[in-house]
């Protein structure tokens, strides 16, 4: 048994029966058994050093984030996590790194009842590829394509904190230690909105998770549903400004607006629902202890129209988003 | 849309309905719907340049092999392929390379009705991670743990040709152009034994695919089933010698034996079945147009005993396998 087989031992756990997993790690395939009437939701993400994380990230935070970004895709579909596979290329076997990575990864997995059922380890430049499996009632998954003109647009939590953390770590903005610690938590340990996503099944008309930025990811919903939208940029900016005691940090409001609308790496949900569902959406937020805020509405005309709190058009401040206008 | 989003276009196909896939590429998750009474078999493999393939491999052959090694895991479980995800890290966007890779990958996928349903592309050192999904009747998957003393041990096809190709490419043995072409086909374009695997459900008591070498992979069955085995090394060697018109190549029999027993990269199936199933195994081979050969038997005593065609012990020729003896 080579050292790369031994690695697998850091990640092995006994299979828990009765949780959608019929056979876990140790054979040619794992066997999944979704409950009757359920479809299996599948998503896969690959993380590469330098592009998705810094070389000096805490291994436990990296393990957490590698699974979190995948679980966030399940949340966006309204799926319940069942299991995941982990493929890992490592330049060398470093026991301290592996233990930390496994601790962070498996703590998040345990918190969501998501079992590691298989994978692969090999020598090579550091690369982490996780494929995650969840179940969702057949035909009821939240898709990008389900919204129509008149629907409200909602966002969970606050977007922009992860980008502020990145800017602070790069020295582009100043944040004191206490603030940086809070912001960095959002960058390195995002919490996938699984509880909210599941409660939005049957309520929301479409959903996506925010990985590339609020407006950029919303635009995928608009394209898939062949509609446009009006977004209250002040509402999204106020959300960010109101979090993590940012007001006292003296940060420019234009910066906050850009981070809230286009920061990325948030792993919040942006979703749509008919106005008749407002109480149900708020209840879903309350039941899942997740802030939900209405930030705009879906319109028939294609394109993305940005307005301020008074409904006046906001132009020229987001050159990166001109091609949506 | 960045160039790494454009990559996805090389791989996109319309989703075929009614084939276990409810939603393909383009949303946060794909949705799989195994037929009623079926479990989902899942396997994931990561391929890294320099370790799993040469930098100068034909892209189409690499695309083929990356999926083939995953499909081989489904074959070993007796599962029918449904779908796969592809995560790809590339140092740069090379249209010719991508088109070749996609052609080889999708030709094999189409041949087995296995749909690409999602994945990820990113910039980084070349890395290919495929996760494959199949379905198998609930509780009937072929596992490593199912054999017992008295069972026959069988192998599909011939093992050792991929290793001979590797040795020839490295200049360690001489093979003329015609022979090298035939051997190289086995190294670079292995054909997963899916048709045989499915027909062995209900007949074989255990199975595994040969990726690390016949004896090495058989040892995983023996360990999982807590048994030992007796292997006729002449039978396995004769299989290799009889293929690809090797007899005239003047290769040393000791070399052929080592390649047949420990070469690796074969993607044949080694499996066990009760002696009462011999006719059924041969029928499964015939129905799937796959050679099946009996090469030994399972024994209660732990360990692996190598014997020649006359039943005499063969010792000292396979130092790498002493720890099984």
Image: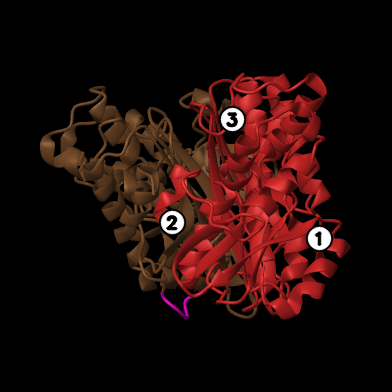
Chain colours: A brown, B red
Where residue B291 sits, quadrant-wise, is: bottom right
In the image, is residue A20 part of the stretch drawn in magenta? yes
Foreground disc of the pair 2, 1: 2
For label 1, count other residues whose C-alpha is less than 10 Å away and answer few (under 14), some (14-19) or many (20+).
few
Q: Chain of mark 1?
A: B
Count of marks overlaid on the render = 3
Q: Is residue A39 visible?
A: yes
Foreground disc of the pair 3, 2: 2
Q: Is label 2 in a helix, a strand or a loop?
A: helix
The Cα atoms of the two marked residues, 3 and 2, are separated by: 29 Å
Q: Is label 1 in a helix, a strand or a loop?
A: loop
Mark sitting earlier along the chain (1/3): 1
Q: Is B57 situated left or right of A169 in this image? A: right
Q: Which mark is residue B324?
A: 2
Mark sitting earlier along the chain (3/2): 3
Residues beneath discs 2 and 1 located on the same chain: yes
For label 3, count other residues whose C-alpha is less than 10 Å away and answer few (under 14), some (14-19) or many (20+).
some
State which region is magenta. A16-21
Q: Chain of mark 2?
A: B
Q: Residue at x 24, y 25 (%)?
A: A173
- Name the residue carrying label 3: B53
- Name the residue carrying label 1: B17
Q: Is residue B23 visible?
A: no
In this view, B6 is above or below B112: above
In the image, is residue B98 part of the stretch drawn in magenta? no
Q: Which mark is residue A195?
A: none
Where is residue A94 shown, x and y percent of the image? 26, 39
Q: Is label 3 in a helix, a strand or a loop?
A: loop
């Amino acid at each position: 048994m080579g050292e790369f087989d031994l690695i697998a031992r850091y990640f092995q756990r006994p299979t828990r029966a009765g949780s959608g997993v019929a056979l876990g790690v140790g054979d040619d395939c794992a066997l999944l058994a979704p409950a009757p009437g359920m479809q299996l939701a599948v998503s896969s993400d690959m993380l590469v050093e330098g592009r998705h994380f810094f070389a000096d990230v805490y291994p436990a935070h990296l393990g957490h984030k590698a699974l979190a970004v995948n679980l966030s895709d399940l949340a966006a579909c309204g799926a319940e996590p069942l299991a995941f596979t982990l493929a890992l290329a490592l330049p060398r076997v470093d026991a301290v790194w592996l233990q930390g990575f496994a601790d962070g990864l498996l703590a998040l997995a345990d918190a969501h009842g998501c079992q590691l059922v298989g994978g692969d380890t090999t020598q090579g430049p550091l690369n982490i590829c996780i494929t995650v499996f969840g179940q969702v009632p057949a035909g009821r998954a939240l898709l990008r394509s389900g919204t129509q003109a008149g629907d409200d647009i909602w966002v969970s939590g606050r977007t922009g904190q992860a980008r502020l953390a990145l800017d602070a770590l790069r020295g582009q903005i100043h944040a004191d230690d206490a603030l940086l610690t809070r912001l960095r938590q959002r960058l390195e340990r995002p919490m996938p909105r699984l509880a909210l996503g599941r409660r939005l099944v049957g309520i929301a008309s479409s959903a996506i998770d925010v990985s590339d930025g609020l407006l950029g990811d919303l635009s995928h919903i608009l394209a898939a549903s062949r509609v446009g939208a009006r977004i209250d940029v002040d509402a999204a900016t106020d959300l960010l400004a109101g979090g993590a005691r940012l007001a006292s940090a003296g940060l420019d409001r234009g910066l906050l607006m850009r981070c809230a609308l286009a920061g990325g790496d948030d792993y919040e949900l942006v979703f749509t629902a008919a106005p008749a569902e407002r109480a149900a959406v708020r209840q879903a937020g309350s039941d899942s202890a997740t802030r939900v805020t209405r930030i705009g509405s879906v319109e028939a005309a294609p394109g993305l129209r940005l307005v301020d709190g008074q409904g006046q058009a906001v132009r020229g401040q987001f050159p990166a988003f001109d091609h949506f206008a």
